[in-house]
Each structure stands twice: as C-alpha cells, then as structure tokens.
Amino acid sequence: VQLQASGGGAVQAGGSLRLSCVASGSISNVGVKGWYRQAPGKQRELVAVITTVGSTNYGDSAKGRFTISRDNAKNTITLQMNSLKPEDTAVYYCAHHAPAGIIWGQGTLVTVSS
C-alpha cells in the first residue's frame, strides 16, 4: 500500500476527527496531495489539496471547518475536521497528484450521526 489512510470513525454531529495519510514506496514527498471523499450514491469530490510549499485549496463543503496540512519530511498529510455534519459522512481518500495521474489511497470511512 503506497498511501495508507487512517483516523476515520464514527462521531456525532459537531464533533471532530483527524485523518492522516502516510505515503511510502515510490510516492514522492513533493507535489500536490489531498483528500477527496465519496458519499453513497454520489461522485467523488474534492475536500482539500495542498502543494509542496503549503498552498491550499478547499472544496466548498470544507471551507472554514477543515484544515489540511502536510509534513514533507515524513511524507504525510493530515486533515483536521471540525464541526462535522451528517452530510460529511463518506469514504475519505487521500491522493497524490503524480505526473501520470492521481494515485489513490484505500479510503477511510467517516460516519457522522445527528
């Protein structure tokens, strides 16, 4: 597994979770990395991405509530999710934007109950 995500789980609305993703093998510690999510019956959507130097971009649903960060030395990214809502329920995937295309992690399930 080249992208190992962890930190998902079940939480009540208003709660917080912190997702982490460790890259290994041939995945570079430079380049754009990010988090995407896919809810049942919906298309995968952007949550947040971050460049090598720390510039970020968030999907509309994440703005003001989620924070993406990275540690290039450890080749990891994290996603701090606060004020979670039931509509945040989804499988969250970490991703590395390689020149040949996006490399996906295996996903971690986040379930938010009302």
Image (spheres, grey):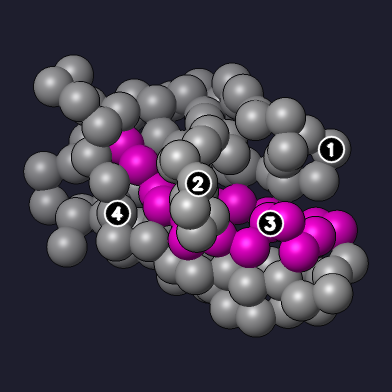
Residue at the disc numbered 4: 105
| Residue at the disc numbered 3 | 88
Crowding around mark 4 (Cα neighbors within 10 Å: few <14, some 14 to 19, many 20+) is many
Question: Which of these two is toward me, 56 or 86?
Answer: 86
Q: What residue type is labelled 2?
A: Lys
Q: Does the magenta stretch include residue 22?
A: no
First in sequence, mark 4 or 3: give its number: 3
First in sequence: mark 3 vs mark 2? 2
As measured in the structure, the alpha-carbon distance from the residue carrying label 4 to the one carrying label 3 is: 19 Å
Element class at badge 2:
loop
- Which corner quadrant holds the N terminus? bottom left
**Residue at screen point 23% across, 40% down:** 103
Classed neighbour count for the residue bearing mark 1: other residues with Cα under 10 Å, few (<14), some (14–19), many (≥20): few
Task: Please tell me the numbered disc located at residue 42.
Answer: 2
Query: Rounded to the nearest whole Å, what is the CA distance between mark 3 and mark 1?
Result: 14 Å
Point out the frontmost of discs 3 and 2.
2
Q: What residue type is labelled 4?
A: Gly
Instruction: Look at label 1 and name its amino acid.
Output: Gly
- Mark pair 2, 4: CA separation: 18 Å
Q: Which disc, if any, is residue 21?
A: none
